[in-house]
Amino acid sequence: MKAFKRILLSAGLVLSAIQSAGVMPVSAEQTAAQAPILAQSQETESAISRLSEGTVFAVPAAQETQAPVPVRQEAPAIRRLPDFSNDAMWKHSPSPYNIPSLWGQCTWFAWGRFMEIYGYDPGFRGNGYECVDQLLAAHPDKFTRSDIPTAGALFSSYNHVGFILEVDGDSWTIQEGNLDQVSNPDWETAIQDWRTVTMTRDEFMAQTGAVWFANPVSPVTFSKE
């Protein structure tokens, strides 16, 4: 840039000297064309003069570019209610409990709901009281055993298995099957034999007796419908 300015200054000075000496006539058009060059040379000369006098020129500060703040993506809410029209999860599922003699049982319901909620085989095959331990053995990286549930937890008691959908202090919302405590070989009867209910912790414990939970490692949220 400095070299370019020196060239412009020299060109302007030479041109001015030639005109002053009368070597060649200067037309109005030439004068107009030379004006930007002369102006640039005068500006450059002025800047050089100021630099020699110790004038300090301010350099515009570089603008800082802030990195974008990542937006945390929350997992979508899971359907709150079972969808028995989804044959892959229910009537034609690979569940070990998917036989007419076990339709309506709490284990049948819990296996189907687990597939809907988490999308993979829970790994339990036994009675209700065995389901939490078998789930933990099959997926130790995805669930942890606890005495206090979180949303999405599978629970086992000595005679039952089901899910915890929400925990709000002492208020727990659970989902469970086999309300009539018998198998339902009729499919339409079996898919009606379940409930979602909110109760206190004490009411839940009175219903189940001793109980243990397999809590999901990743937080789970259910829809309101």
Image (cartoon, helix red, strand yellow):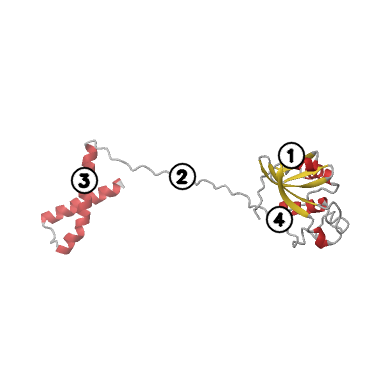
Q: Mark 3 or mark 2, which is nearer the start of the sequence?
A: 3
Q: Nearer the viewer, mark 2 or mark 1?
A: 1
Estimate the x, y position of residue 178 in percent, counting from the top left. 81, 52
Q: Nearer the viewer, mark 3 or mark 1?
A: 1
Residue indicated by mark 1: 202
Q: Quadrant of residue 15?
A: bottom left
Q: Nearer the viewer, mark 2 or mark 3?
A: 2
**Residue 66, numbered label:** 2
The amino acid beneath tag 4 is Leu
Estimate the x, y position of residue 205 in percent, counting from the top left. 77, 40
Q: CA distance from mark 4 to mark 1?
A: 24 Å
Residue indicated by mark 3: 45
Residue located at (49% from left, 45% from top)? 67
Q: Mark 1 or mark 4, which is nearer the start of the sequence?
A: 4
Estimate the x, y position of residue 121 in percent, counting from the top left. 78, 51
Along the horizontal axis of the image, is 181 left or right of 214? Answer: right
Q: Mark 1 or mark 2, which is nearer the start of the sequence?
A: 2
Q: Mark 4 or mark 2, which is nearer the start of the sequence?
A: 2
Residue located at (88% from left, 57% from top)? 101
Q: Nearer the viewer, mark 4 or mark 1?
A: 1
Label 3 sits on a secondary structure element that is helix
The amino acid beneath tag 1 is Asp
Q: Mark 4 or mark 3, which is nearer the start of the sequence?
A: 3
The amino acid beneath tag 3 is Glu
Q: Are marks 3 and 4 in contact (CB under 8 Å)?
A: no
Mark 4 crowd level (few <14, some 14–19, many ≥20, 10 Å Cα): some
Q: CA distance from mark 2 to mark 3?
A: 40 Å
Residue indicated by mark 4: 81
The amino acid beneath tag 2 is Gln
Q: Are marks 2 and 1 in contact (CB under 8 Å)?
A: no
Residue located at (74% from left, 39% from top)? 202
